[in-house]
Amino acid sequence: MAELQMNAKSSKRSSSSKRSNNGFTRKCASLVKEQRARIYILRRCATMLLCWYIQGDDN
């Protein structure tokens, strides 16, 4: 009976650690997605500004 209780406790610990790892993974994925979006916007803005600057030199 004691062995059964110890196994139940250890399985609860492993499932809770999996949840915390899953939460950590989700947070990391969310941060990566946000940073990729910011880099995309910055790249688009820089491209637009560069195109406007190049077109301004033609006049």
Image (cartoon, rainbow, N blue to C red):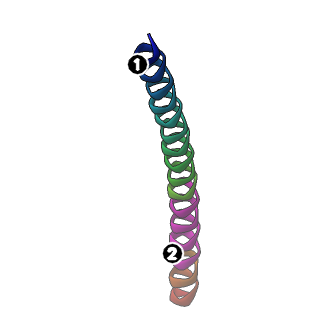
Q: Can you give x and y, in whole percent of width and height, for residue 44 in the image?
A: 52, 63
Identify the residue at image location x=55%, y=58%. Answer: 35
In the picture, the disc for residue 51 is 2
Q: Quadrant of the C terminus?
A: bottom right
Q: Which residues are magenta?
A: 37-51
Q: What amino acid does circle 2 point to? A: Cys
Q: What amino acid does circle 1 point to? A: Glu
Of tags 2 and 1, which is closer to the observer? 1
In the picture, the disc for residue 18 is none
In the picture, the disc for residue 3 is 1
1 or 22, nearer to the observer? 1
Q: Can you give x and y, in whole percent of width and height, for residue 10 in the image?
A: 45, 28
39 or 49, nearer to the observer? 39
Residue 51 vertical placement versus 37 (above, below): below
Query: Crowding near pointer 1: few (<14 within 10 Å), some, many (20+)?
Result: few
Q: Quadrant of the N terminus?
A: top left
Query: Which quadrant holds residue 48?
Result: bottom right
Report the residue that reaches farthest toward the top. 1
